Amino acid sequence: MAILFKKSYKFALRSALFITIVLFILLTIFLWFKEVFDWQFLVLSSICIFTVCFFVIQLRVEKFIYKRIKRIYDDVSLLESSTLSSRTVTTDMSSLTAEIEKFAKDKKIEIDTLKIREEYRRDFIGNVSHELKTPLFTVQGYILTLLDGAANDKTLRKKYLQRASKGVDRLIYIVKDLDLITKLEVGDLHIEVAEFNIVELIQSVFDLLEMKAAKKKITLTFDMKYPEPIMVNADKEKIQQVITNLLVNSIKYGHENGTTEVSVENLIKNKVIVRVTDNGEGIAKQHIPRLFERFYRVDKSGSREEGGSGLGLAIVKHIIEAHNEKIYVESVLGVGSEFSFTLEKSKSQPVIAK
């Protein structure tokens, strides 16, 4: 009952008691001087005064507070998303204060989130326009040159058309990656889980990227020999894309005569972790939290010498998350980087000996 006792009642009770005591003292002094002192009259008068004061003060305070609090609720109700406006109006100040504080905190979080999204939107639009603008202007330049008369020169015509074709291929590559990442983000990409040997898959990616790595004299290798297959449950095609993207990045930003090492280790009973470690350029600490954002590049110079759509790591992250798995990154500038991700181990898979 004490918990439900309104603070306005306490205020009215204390105020009525104070007024009653003051009036009781004045009335006692008055009756004493008039020599008509009557204790029974004083007690009854005090009870009446206290009762009248309590109800009058309570009603006035309740009405006064309610009007002002109702105005606050009405103002808040202008925000349609507010949960505060849908609640019953309370005149309990502690409850109201708690509600207002929660409302303010929620709104602050909402505003901060909107600011982050707006900043991300600006960055994204800027990056998309930059990524598309470069090949578009390249293709446009070659076509305009051909139209201006270069088409009459058979050698120039072939060379410029080939370069324009490469620009179109880059545009198609970017659009395909954008389409893929959009499907991944909205959960529209179907994951076909099957059992396969992850070591065999990694080796096949090594074979595909052998020539690309050889150009920079980078060695693609396992951390050890894996005589036994390591069976996992995942979408083989999508995991191949993950491994390819990570290895391509390690080659792209690796030093000449460097090494990219892949290992497969037990993590917990039903999980393995695949690590891709290189001794390349490394990544500065401030860039790591944003590595998996679309089009985010550590190199802000705008150079596109290394190619790519700028979506590789974003795609990797979404594919791994679509498998309900985790991806991690550790890097030291000038030392190298390690990207790792987890996969579900096949139930028939024996313990991996290291």
Image (spheres, rainbow, N blue to C red):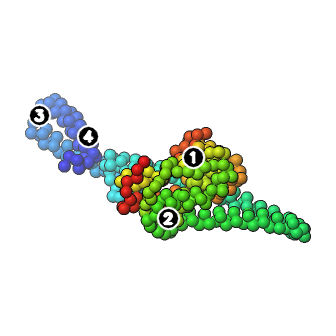
Label annotation for residue 122: none
- Residue sitting nearer the eye, 299 or 224: 224
Q: What residue type is labelled 3?
A: Val
Q: Distance between the residues labelled 3 and 4?
A: 28 Å
Which of 75/230 is in front?
A: 230
Check contact, mark 4 vs mark 2: CB within 8 A.
Answer: no
Q: What element carries label 3?
A: loop
- The disc at residue 236 is 2
Which circle's residue, 3 or 4, is located before the other in the chain? 4
Mark earlier in primary sequence (1, 4): 4
Comes first in the chain, label 3 or label 1: 3
Front disc: 3 or 2: 2
* Viewer-closest of 9 and 126: 126
Position of 160 with respect to 116 (left or right) is right
User: CA separation, marks 2 and 1?
Assistant: 24 Å
Residue at x 38%, y 59% (from the top left corner): 349
Viewer-nearest of discs 1 and 4: 1
State the separation of the CA atoms marked 4 and 2: 77 Å
- SS for dot 2: helix
Question: Which residue is at the front of the view, 342 or 80?
Answer: 342
Q: Which of marks 3 and 1 is in front?
A: 1
Indicate the amino acid at tag 2. Answer: Lys
Judging by the rendered image, the residue that carries numbered circle 1 is 278
Q: Earlier in the sequence, mark 4 or mark 2?
A: 4
* Labelled disc at residue 15: 4
| Among the 4 quarters of the image, the one containing residue 272 | bottom left
